[in-house]
């Protein structure tokens, strides 16, 4: 007994000394593909679908809200403009809160805010109330939910990161494809206010997905493990999980504004949101204005989303092959998309609008599929949270300018057509008495001649 006691007394200092020395931990990759990452990817897929599809589906109730409040179209367009603008503007705040609290908590808060905004907006108190609820609260909640989920996907995937980002972004087009006819059916069955209440309940699924967002904390395995006390100290030394300093300056890295490549990404984000988001918002109202029935007009967004889905999957697979740089691939796809959007007004028949919707939706999806991958390649994974948040913040200006300008253009065109119609009616009403008087004069002349 004395020997074993002495050996234990001798062994314990050796173990403690070994624990104090730096442990030889083999290097492990910081980001690994697969595993629980597939759960993160599935959750991000649903979050992207719920947070981004509402802006496109809003076109279903656009004209109903305009008739309900009896206002011009550009006033109703401010609802979607505020939603998208707040979604982008709150991105730096969402990134900061993700580092300060956790990605999971921020997503759950975002789900509650998004659902609350839609629920309060469904009461339809006033257009100003919808600006504050459906516009501000819903945009804030969607931004809080989306930014942390995308950040976690990039942490869990390295080799398959382009494909993972493409799959996650496909949630937007899949949910838009499914929910567009479903929401149109709800509006036809009930009303736009009751439909928004049901949508508010569906948005609570963001909280469920947020609960599944487990923070990524990689650990290195140590070579030597002895007693419980020694292994505890070694585990503390070997832990290499991401630790962020609770410093406000680390959350908003304004030094990025000094980098030319980041400035180029900011300008790209601004012009893309000004031009490329407008067709998705006003496709349904445009089709309704030219005489297409409501349900068929709603199906156009489903066709757009189908092309969007194939574009994201195809471009994500192509980018994952690494045949060319992601930024070059993005440039090619954006050029084709711009040409397609310039030719879109040529389509007047329903079949041509379907064709253009599928083509433009396809190349629109290719752009969104690899935009996060391009930003990661340009700025690096370490700067992804800050750079993505700041770029989304600067895109706010484009979000506020684009939809109201497009609505104002449509409104001016509608007003001109209405004025032309009124003038034609006045001209017809004025010409009819003249024609009747001339006919009466001719009739009297004939009667006198016969007599």
Image (cartoon, rainbow, N blue to C red):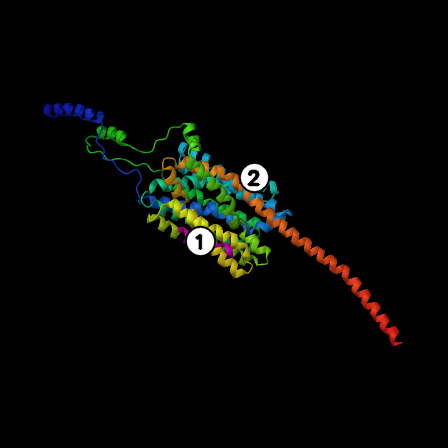
The residue that appears at 56% across and 39% down in the rendered structure is 132
Residue receiving disc 1: 362
Quadrant holding the N terminus: top left
**Within 10 Å of the Cα at label 1, are there few (<14), some (14-19), or many (20+) other Cα atoms?**
many
Residue at 80% over, 65% down: 436
Front: mark 1 or 2: 1
Q: Is residue 332 left or right of residue 6?
A: right
Q: Assign the magenta stretch its main secondary structure.
A: helix
Looking at the rendering, the stretch of residues picked out in magenta corresponds to: 299-312
- Report the residue marked by disc 2: 132
Q: Is residue 231 shown above or below 271?
A: above
Question: Would you say residue 301 sits in the magenta stretch?
Answer: yes
Q: Is residue 43 visible?
A: no
Q: Pick whichever, 292 or 270, lies toward us.
A: 270
Residue 10, compared with residue 127, is above or below; it is above
Q: Residue at x 49, y 56 (%)?
A: 356
Find residue 422 and report its horizontal and vertical position in percent.
70, 55
Please tell me whether residue 185 belongs to the stretch shown in magenta: no
Q: Which of the labelled discs sits on residue 295, or is there none?
A: none
Q: Which SS class for mark 2?
A: helix
The answer to whether the residues at label 1 and label 2 have Cβ atoms under 8 Å apart is: no
Give left or right: position of 409 versus 252: right
Q: Residue furthest bottom?
A: 450
């Amino acid at each position: 007994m004395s020997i074993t006691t002495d050996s234990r007394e001798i062994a314990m200092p050796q173990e403690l000394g070994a624990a104090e020395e730096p442990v030889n931990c083999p290097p492990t990759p910081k980001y690994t593909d697969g595993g629980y990452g597939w759960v993160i990817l599935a959750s991000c897929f649903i979050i992207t679908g719920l947070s981004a599809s509402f802006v496109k589906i809003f076109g279903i109730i656009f004209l109903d809200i305009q008739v309900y409040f009896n206002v011009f179209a550009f006033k109703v367009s401010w609802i979607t403009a505020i939603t998208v603008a707040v979604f982008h503007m709150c991105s730096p705040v969402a990134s900061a809160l993700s580092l300060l609290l956790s990605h999971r908590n921020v997503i759950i808060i975002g789900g509650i805010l998004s659902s609350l905004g839609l629920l309060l907006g469904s009461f339809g108190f006033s257009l100003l109330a919808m600006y504050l609820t459906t516009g501000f609260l819903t945009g804030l909640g969607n931004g809080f939910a989306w930014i942390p989920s995308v950040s976690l996907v990039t942490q869990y995937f390295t080799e398959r990161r382009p494909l993972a980002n493409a799959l996650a972004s496909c949630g937007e087009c899949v949910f838009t494809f499914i929910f567009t006819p479903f929401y149109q059916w709800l509006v036809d069955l009930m009303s736009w206010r009751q439909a928004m209440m049901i949508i508010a309940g569906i948005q609570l699924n963001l909280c469920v997905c947020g609960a599944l967002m487990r923070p990524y904390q990689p650990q290195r395995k140590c070579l030597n493990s002895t007693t419980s006390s020694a292994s505890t100290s070694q585990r503390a030394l070997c832990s290499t999980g991401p630790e962020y300093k609770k410093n406000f300056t680390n959350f908003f890295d304004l030094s990025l504004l000094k980098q030319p490549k980041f400035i180029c990404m900011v300008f790209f984000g601004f012009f893309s949101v000004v031009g490329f988001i407008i067709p998705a918002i006003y496709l349904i109202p445009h089709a309704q204005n030219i005489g297409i029935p409501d349900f068929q007009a709603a199906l156009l967004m489903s066709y757009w989303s189908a092309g969007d889905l194939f574009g994201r999957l195809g471009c994500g697979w192509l980018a994952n092959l690494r045949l060319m740089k992601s930024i070059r691939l993005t440039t090619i796809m954006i050029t084709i998309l711009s040409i397609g959007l310039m030719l879109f007004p040529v389509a007047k028949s329903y079949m041509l609008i379907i064709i253009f919707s599928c083509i433009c939706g396809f190349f629109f999806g290719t752009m969104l599929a690899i935009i996060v991958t391009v930003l990661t390649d340009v700025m690096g994974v370490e700067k992804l949270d800050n750079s993505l948040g700041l770029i989304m913040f600067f895109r706010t200006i484009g979000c506020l300018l684009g939809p109201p300008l497009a609505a104002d253009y449509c409104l001016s065109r509608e007003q001109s057509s209405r004025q032309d119609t009124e003038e034609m009616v006045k001209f017809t009403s004025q010409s009819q008495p003249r024609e009747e008087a001339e006919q009466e004069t001719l009739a009297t002349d004939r009667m006198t001649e016969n007599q």
